[in-house]
Amino acid sequence: MDDPGDGRAFLGVHGLAFAGRETELRALLGTVSGVRPAVVLVEGEAGIGKSRLVAEASAVLRERHLRVLAGACHPLREPLAYGPVIDALRRIGPWLPPVERLGASAGVLAPLLPDLAGALPAPPPDLSPEVSVSGAGRFWVVSAVRTVLEAVAPAVLVVEDVHWADEATRELLLLLARDMPGDVALVLTYRGEELPGGRPVLGVPFRRPPGTGGAELRLGPLGEAELRVMAREVLGGDPAPALVRTLLERSGGLPLVIEEDLITLARSPGGADTAALRVPRSLGEVLAERTGRLGPDAAALVDAAALLAVPAGAALLAEAAGLDEERGDAALLEALDAAVLRQTGPDTYGFGHVLAREAVYDALPGPVRNRTRRRVLEVLLAQDPPPLVQIAHHTRALGDRKAWLSRARAAADQATAVGDTGTAAALLNEIIEQPDLTPRELAHAAWALSYTASVGTEAATTVRTLRRILTVAGLPEEVRGRIRTSLGGLLIYQVGDLAGEQEIVTALAEVGDGTPVTSARILSYLGLSQTDRFTLAEQRDLVRRGYDLLADVESRNARPIMDVARIFLQGVAADPALPEVLAALPRDGEVPVLQATAFSVCSIAETWLCVGHDTRSAAAVEELRSMAPRTHLPMLDPYLDTFRVVLDWQAGHWDEAERGLAELDDRHPDNPLRSGGLLAAVRGLTAAARGLTAQAAALFDAALTRGLHLDLFGAAAGRARLHLARNDPQAAWRTLTDPLDFLGFLDRKEAWGYAWDLVPTAVETLLALDRVDEARELTERHATSIEGRDAPGAVAEQHHCRGLLLAATDPEAATAAFDLAAAQWTDIGRPYRAALAAERAARTDADGTEARLAAPTAAFEHLGATSDAARCHRALRDLGRQTPNLRGRTGYGDRLSPREEQIRDLLATGATNKDIAAALFLSTRTVENHVARVLTKLRTTRADLVRTDGQHGGQHG
């Protein structure tokens, strides 16, 4: 092969000139051959040359000693989760190292690659083929695929036509792309216009992780110059301008049609004479001319291939065409020689492109098509195991509705069993749309579709699916209630829509108490409510009712449903028994039991994070991560990532928290937790600490639109504190009580142990309003309510509230109370809260303010809490403890001074002069002067400074 980098056209792997794609080929080769890991996306319409580009690149890469593994997705596929990737890996046997040198995780692939079982480690003892491709088993598969790819590296995994990928394959590719093994590249081709629902190719927006190379190539039509090069190579000599114009007009620049036309011209008696170009414009007629020269046997075999729709072996093609082995081989050779069919694998043959197959299929007369389809169906039914999806497809095409229903159900069941939820959902959707289904048929299909939708990866798509199912008339009430409960849970926990709770309430009314397990499941969801719909006491009653329903039920998986809700309620109340509860949870057993344990561990981790047991919370998060491969609950991933960010922030690792936020945005771009209460508190408090009050207010306000919710205490307190900083206690009080009464909600949920600054902020607000008695009553209520609870953060907040109450009448006692709060926060491991309490103690201690302010000021500066540090410096200036430099400003020349560096950092976040003045406790005029000097020294503009910071990910947002 000629060097693709020299700018010349060259004959490619198919013998036709490869022209017009040199830039794309050079980009693909440069990326894949350069920095690995790498991810390359190749987009283009049907026939535009994606497969050809990849084929040419693969040939070059093999010459460069890279191992190319290729698989493709098909529109009519049998249920096999990860099928294209598994197909690509079937050929790695000769490259694998001895089995003892392979990571144990590779054994997960043994059930999926039976031909390589001897070359792979033994699968885990509790792993069946069904488990390996369902639920969290897909995470095992991702790990296994990474292991084998690393073992055969340097390697390139090519997956073509990803627009036809099932959900499991799409998720596998997404997870692999986000964490690529070293020295491996991933190349994906797809048609953007055929992506399901207009979604991104991997289901969610994909951003390459740091350290991963990549490119996104979009192929367009070829032009006249490229067509002339191709014609010269195929026909010999320079083509006539009229021929080039005719070819371009006929093809629209589509390489597939250009190639087909040139092959036809090359084989016609007239050669390149335009008069000889009599084939019609459409590709269908090009194929019709080519197939018209075939003998009867070859024509029958091509017709069978068009009906089969997927590449097939020689024996299957011959049988489907009604030919014996000898005649079938001869017919196949004739079809290959005529370039109607191509070899697509070691013993598989099909059309070179889907358009070619469709052209032949469309040209078949109705009687011939039906006769061929009946023969194809007979052949498929005789296979062992039978390809159920294809059988259902051909049965329906023949108009046998009764047989199709039975076969479609069987195919959907098989697809669900092996984890191919995309195929199952497509079949079940078709079933549900059929008129005159019996109630039993409708219930079976609706509940099966509800299940496949619930374990899918696209929450928005799943919600639409479940809503549509609920509109189907004739569903039994129990089935409707189960589906509605799934919808409600999805809305609450994955979409962030609290209206999902009403769906669950409606489901309970639909089902009643007649079906104990279903009713208990619904009651458990209501027991997990974090809204103002129920008091905590009412939720305890709901959970007790669920346990009563299950009293006579023998199902081993029923009680864990209620245990999850009971443990959640214990957590909200900061029950001291939680450590024992956590220790007693089962870590072995069936998947439903492990899932219940995982949900309970997750709620305990969140509780401890909210009440100030950060070390315990971090340990619970890590345990849950280690359980993930066995629990089949990828929906918990964003929760674990959220907890990790909040824990990092509370521990003072703000840079780590910001990196975690960026990763969370990339990994879970559509998850409501990104803007939910816990992360809104972290983002908003960070912005406020850096003086970005407008940004902080917007973050808090966006979160508070959700209504009353347990994870919004921090956002409510943060928003109220912004008002207090502006000397507007009336607005602060409205934030806490009107229209959302967070203090009443705190009482109804008995969540007094939650330490998100809500009670201290309320006490400070009441004191600012001169409502001292109410402040005292709230403090006493808080003290009484946390007695007997295991909530160290609430203890620190109680000390803080005492300090606020005593500050005006007994400064010494107030200082001691603030010191106790600071010490408690230090013991918990939250330096920012400790510094805020220490600052309060310093300001209350009139005789020791200067000395006491040094420590919190240093802590604020270390954290990057610019506004808090500036407030401390301002306090020292007001006390006269800091004197100006009588010799004038220290000279920094073209370098930024420390103050100017602060200004630069704030400017980069988009802060206005007013924001900066408030953050640094300076006058707006002073800030204007600073800003002018910063921009002059940096030789930039304000807009460019913001844009540059955004391109590098930002550091202070």
Image (cartoon, rainbow, N blue to C red):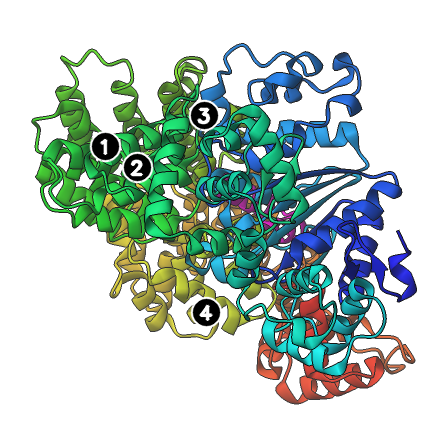
Q: Position of residue 709 (x, y in %)?
A: 31, 51
Could you tell me if the residues under marks 4 and 3 are in contact, i.e. CB atoms within 8 Å? no
Q: Earlier in the sequence, mark 4 or mark 2?
A: 2
Tell me: residue 215, above or below residue 581: below
Foreground mark, 4 or 3, reads: 3
Judging depth in this view, the residue of 157 and 258 nearest the camera is 258
The spot of residue 338 in percent (x, y) is 65, 48
Q: Residue at x 25, y 46 (%)?
A: 747
Q: In whole angstroms, how far apart are the C-alphas of marks 4 and 1?
A: 58 Å
Say which residue label 4 marks: 698
Counting residues from the start of the chain, the first of labels 4 and 3 encountered is: 3
Residue 645 covered by magenta stretch: yes
Magenta stretch containing residue 139, yes or no? no
Q: How many marks?
A: 4
The residue that appears at 40% across and 34% down in the rendered structure is: 376
**Residue in view at x 60 percent, y 37 percent:** 332
Identify the residue at horizontal 71%, vertical 59% (top origin): 267
Across and down, in percent, residue 742 comes to 29, 55
Out of 538 and 763, give the one closest to the viewer. 538
Q: Nearer the viewer, mark 3 or mark 1?
A: 1
Name the secondary structure under disc 4: helix
Residue tagged 2: 395
Label 1: which residue? 403
Residue 598 vertical placement versus 919 (above, below): above
Query: Circles 1 and 2: CB distance less than 8 Å?
Result: yes
Instruction: Name the amino acid, label 2.
Output: Thr
Nearer to me, 626 or 114: 114
